[in-house]
């Protein structure tokens, strides 16, 4: 069973990451996390249509010169009250086989909900460049996001993953590709950047922020990474928010009645 380590972000920027909590016999893992980054909404308004930015960089705590450890699963827990409505956009029903042959054209253009770039690290030493880039196109389907990659150096290689959405939890199992150790026999991500723009169709948003902005003025998003060697690390991102303005009666409005100081429906969590 793998060691469980915890890392926490303190802001929505990639650079803001606290030290991982000590939880194993490896001092390197305790001092330096395997991933640096964040996930955050693109709007600070409560109860509003929003997009999401996912930005991660991966590193090897034991030796920064080596390729990173291979992340095999990413689980994101959105804040209470956040919404992802996969019935709002049109849906792509293409099979994995169709996607791996045709790539993004296998899905109708209207079903696209995001895009990004992944950089992989072979570790070097072979006939190919150490780093390879793959563009990512994301499509909507019922209770899932389909990710289709297109590797620039190998156009025929079109990896596919499906992020399963269950309430506030989104689970992605990354496809594995062989590679030379150390630290493992796979080719891991060096970086992963994906943007889901704000999307509204017929007045219905694909994503919506929680209706309340907490008193701390940020929403919390928790991301758990599982690596090929069984290690798990957690990153807590803070997505900034601004409370909705409270409508207060003007002085003298409503003769003989004392103006309300705070509307119960607008109170922060």
Image (cartoon, rainbow, N blue to C red):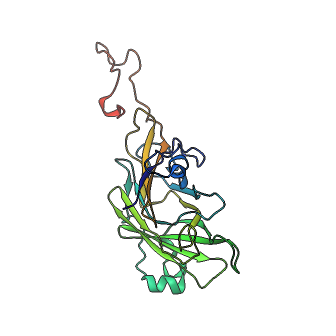
The front one of 88 and 224 is: 224
Residue 205 in view here: no
Q: Position of residue 181 (x, y in %)?
A: 57, 72
Q: Is residue 215 above or below residue 73?
A: above
Q: Residue furthest top?
A: 256
Residue located at (43% from left, 66% from top) = 172
Q: Residue 123's image quarter?
A: bottom right
The front one of 91 and 77 is: 77
Residue located at (33% from left, 18% from top) = 259
Residue 243 in view here: yes
Q: Is residue 31 above or below residue 197?
A: above
Q: Residue 117's image quarter?
A: bottom right
Q: Position of residue 262 (x, y in %)?
A: 34, 24
Q: Position of residue 246 (x, y in %)?
A: 41, 30
Q: Residue 91's image quarter?
A: bottom left
Residue located at (71% from left, 74% from top) = 129
The front one of 230 and 81 is: 230
Q: Is residue 87 above or below residue 152?
A: above
The front one of 17 and 43 is: 17
Q: Position of residue 28 (x, y in %)?
A: 55, 51
Q: In the picture, which quadrant includes the N terminus? A: bottom left
The number of callouts visible is 0
Q: In the picture, which quadrant includes the C terminus? A: top left
């Amino acid at each position: 069973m793998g060691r469980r380590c915890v890392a926490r972000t303190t802001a929505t920027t990639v650079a803001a990451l606290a030290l991982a909590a000590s939880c194993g016999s490896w001092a390197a893992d305790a001092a330096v996390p395997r991933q640096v980054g964040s996930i955050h909404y693109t709007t600070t308004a409560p109860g509003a249509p929003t997009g999401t930015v996912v930005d991660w960089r991966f590193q090897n705590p034991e030796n920064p010169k080596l390729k990173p450890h291979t992340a095999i699963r990413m689980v994101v827990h959105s804040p209470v009250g956040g919404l992802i409505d996969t019935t709002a956009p049109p849906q792509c029903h293409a099979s994995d086989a169709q996607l791996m042959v045709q790539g993004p054209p296998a899905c109708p253009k209207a079903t696209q909900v995001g895009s990004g770039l992944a950089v992989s690290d072979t570790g070097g030493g072979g006939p190919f460049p150490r780093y390879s880039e793959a563009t990512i196109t994301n499509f909507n389907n019922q209770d899932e996001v389909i990710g289709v990659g297109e590797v620039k150096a190998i156009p025929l290689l079109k990896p596919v993953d499906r992020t399963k959405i269950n309430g506030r939890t989104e689970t992605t199992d990354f496809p594995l590709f062989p590679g030379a150790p150390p630290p493992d026999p796979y080719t891991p991500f060096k970086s992963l950047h994906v943007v889901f723009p704000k999307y509204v169709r017929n007045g219905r948003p694909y994503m919506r922020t929680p209706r309340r902005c907490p008193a701390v003025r940020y929403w919390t998003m928790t991301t758990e990474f599982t690596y090929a060697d069984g290690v798990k690390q957690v990153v807590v991102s803070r997505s900034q928010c601004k409370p909705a303005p409270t409508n207060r009666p003007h002085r003298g409005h409503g003769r003989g009645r004392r103006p309300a100081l705070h509307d119960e429906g607008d109170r922060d969590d």
